[in-house]
Image: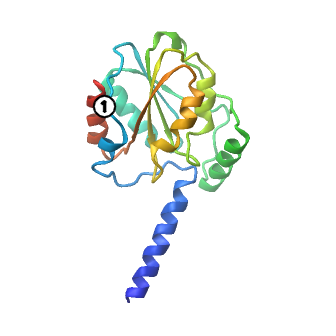
Amino acid sequence: MKKFFSILMMALLALGVAACGGAAEQTAPAPQEQAKTETAAQPASSGKVLVAYFSHTGNTQKVAELIQSKTGADIFRIETATPYPTAYRETTELAKQEKAANARPALKNTVPDMAQYDVIFVGYPIWWYTAPMAVATFADSYDFTGKTVITFCTSGGSPISDSTPDIKNWFKGANVIEGIRAYPSDAASTERWLERLGY
């Protein structure tokens, strides 16, 4: 019986690790201490705020809307001109190809006046250990020099730190503050994080 349970636990662990590399937005139970340890409390600018996010299944959108409601920010959804497939495997494969090619998929819409924002919260799911390439297109589309970019992500297992090197590379000239891996089911952790940032 013990051997059976050991095999079962190993199989579940393997499935969990594999899921983190894919392209779906995952929602795992929110660890209570994670939001406290993943980011240092850093004061944000008092300027005008924008929440920009990419969301495929809706998890990142829920977190973005919570941040918008707590900060009074404007909100902008990063959408590709050609939508990603709805099937998990197809989306995963396309995301993998885009990452390998360092692609910049065309976006459906633009921020009318990015110059007015001093602080931009940027949210995304973790796809293949980084942000989707649509976020890179968004970063390339505006001048972020002197602006503060605060990240947040949704993921079933990968930490936000996996994506930070790419975010710092893409958002050239910005002061990038690494944020949290957030959970739609744990609004309280996100709210505590925002409080530590001064919102």
How many numbered discs, if any? 1
Judged from this view, the residue extending furthest toward the bottom is 1
Mark 1 — residue? 41
Q: Can residue 44 be seen in the rendering of this structure?
A: yes
Q: How is the image coloured?
A: rainbow
Residue 69, given in percent of the width and then of the height, sits at 32, 27
Q: Quadrant of the C terminus?
A: top left
Local packing at callout 1 (Cα closer than 10 Å; few below 14, some 14-19, many 20+) is some
Q: Residue at x 37, y 42 (%)?
A: 38
Residue 164 x, y percent position in the rendering: 51, 37
In the rendered structure, the answer to whether residue 174 lies left or right of residue 66 reads right
User: Residue 158 location, x and y as percent?
Assistant: 48, 50
**Quadrant where the N terminus lies?**
bottom left
Relative to the observer, which residue lies in front, 182 or 161? Answer: 161
Name the element at disc 1: loop
Closer to the camera in the image, 173 or 118: 173
Foreground residue among 132 and 178: 178
The x, y position of residue 47, in whole percent, is: 37, 12
**Residue drawn at 59 percent across, 20 percent down:** 110
Q: Amino acid at mark 1?
A: Ala
Residue 125 lies, with reference to residue 151, above or below; the image says: below
Residue at 43% in and 85% down: 4
Residue 40, compared with residue 16, is above or below; it is: above
Q: Residue furthest right?
A: 101
Question: Is residue 58 in view from this perspective?
Answer: no
